[in-house]
Structures are given as structure tokens and as C-alpha cells.
């Protein structure tokens, strides 16, 4: 898979997550079986902005041919998604999140593999 393709997939996923956290935080929390609270929704909206920023990063870099930039952004993607997947598994095993979080973990691991392969071949 090319950086262009992975960047577009990541951009769309981050855009959907950003919009979801900004405008449907209760639904996002409910999917993971987490009780909605004022504090959780506030943090969720802030995370939504971070996801939108990540979407913008991948949108702006999707057509780059600069190997250094591809390496830096791919390294960020591997580390961020590996940490998210690990945290998701930890919270699921601790029974603080429902099984729907495993969908997120699977997608995060797929991105780790995709961006990791890019790093290995570059």
C-alpha cells in the first residue's frame, strides 16, 4: 500500500472520529459502554479537535514525495496507533470499555501494520 492511500484512509477515519467526538460524544461513549458525563463529553470534544488536526495533517501530506516527511509522519502514525491499540486493549481487559472498542483496536493495528510496512521498505 502506498503512503498516498494510507494517508487518505487515515484522513477519512480521523475526520469521522473528529466529527463524531465533536457532535455525537454521547453516542461514541455509549458504543464503548462508558457512562456519559459533562467531563467525559468535554474531553471528547477536545479529542475531536485533535482528530480533526490529524486528519488535516494527513490531507496536507498525502501527495508528498519527500521521503523524510513520509518517514516522520509514518513514524508518528505507527507510534500513535500502537499506543491507542494498547490502551484500548488495556481498558477492555480492565472492563472499563465494552467490546466495541475492539473494532477501534483492530483498525489501529491495521494502520500500525500499513505504516510500519512503509517504514520497513523505505
Image: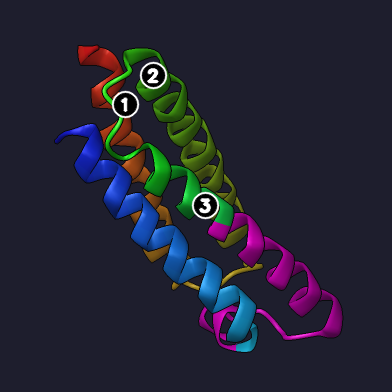
The residue identified by callout 2 is 71
Q: Is residue 35 magenta?
A: yes
The residue identified by callout 1 is 116
Disc nearer the start of the sequence (2/3) = 2
Q: Is residue 80 visible?
A: yes
Identify the residue shown where x is 52% and y is 49%.
54
Q: Quadrant of residue 35?
A: bottom right
State the separation of the CA atoms marked 2 and 3.
27 Å
Q: Is 73 displayed left or right of 65 in the figure? A: right
Q: Is 52 displayed left or right of 50 in the figure? A: left
For the image, the number of numbered tags is 3
Q: Which mark is residue 89?
A: 3
Disc nearer the start of the sequence (3/1) = 3
Label 1: how many residues lie within 10 Å, few (<14), some (14-19) or many (20+)?
some
* Labels 2 and 3 touching (C-beta < 8 A): no
x, y (%) of residue 17?
Answer: 49, 68
Is label 1 in a helix, a strand or a loop?
Answer: helix
Vertical placement of residue 74 versus 102, above or below: above
State the separation of the CA atoms marked 2 and 1.
10 Å
Magenta span of residues: 27-52
x, y (%) of residue 95?
Answer: 62, 67
x, y (%) of residue 120?
Answer: 26, 14
Question: Which quadrant would the N terminus be assigned to in this image?
Answer: top left
Q: Nearer the viewer, mark 3 or mark 1?
A: 1
x, y (%) of residue 59?
Answer: 38, 49
Vertical placement of residue 9 versus 63, above or below: below
Identify the residue shown where x is 45% and y is 65%.
15
Is label 2 in a helix, a strand or a loop?
Answer: helix
State the separation of the CA atoms marked 3 and 1.
20 Å
Q: Nearer the viewer, mark 2 or mark 1?
A: 2
Q: Is 14 displayed left or right of 30 in the figure? A: left
Amino acid at each position: 500500500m502506498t503512503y498516498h492511500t494510507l494517508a487518505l484512509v487515515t484522513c477519512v477515519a480521523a475526520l469521522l472520529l473528529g466529527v463524531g467526538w465533536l457532535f455525537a460524544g454521547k453516542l461514541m461513549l455509549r458504543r464503548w459502554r462508558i457512562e456519559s458525563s459533562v467531563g467525559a463529553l468535554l474531553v471528547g470534544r477536545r479529542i475531536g479537535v485533535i482528530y480533526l488536526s490529524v486528519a488535516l495533517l494527513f490531507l496536507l501530506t498525502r501527495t508528498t514525495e519527500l521521503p523524510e516527511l513520509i518517514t516522520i509522519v509514518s513514524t508518528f502514525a505507527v507510534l500513535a496507533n500502537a499506543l491507542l491499540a494498547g490502551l484500548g486493549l488495556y481498558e477492555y481487559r480492565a472492563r472499563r470499555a465494552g467490546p466495541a472498542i475492539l473494532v477501534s483496536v483492530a483498525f489501529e493495528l491495521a494502520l500500525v501494520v500499513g505504516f510500519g510496512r512503509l517504514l520497513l521498505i523505505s
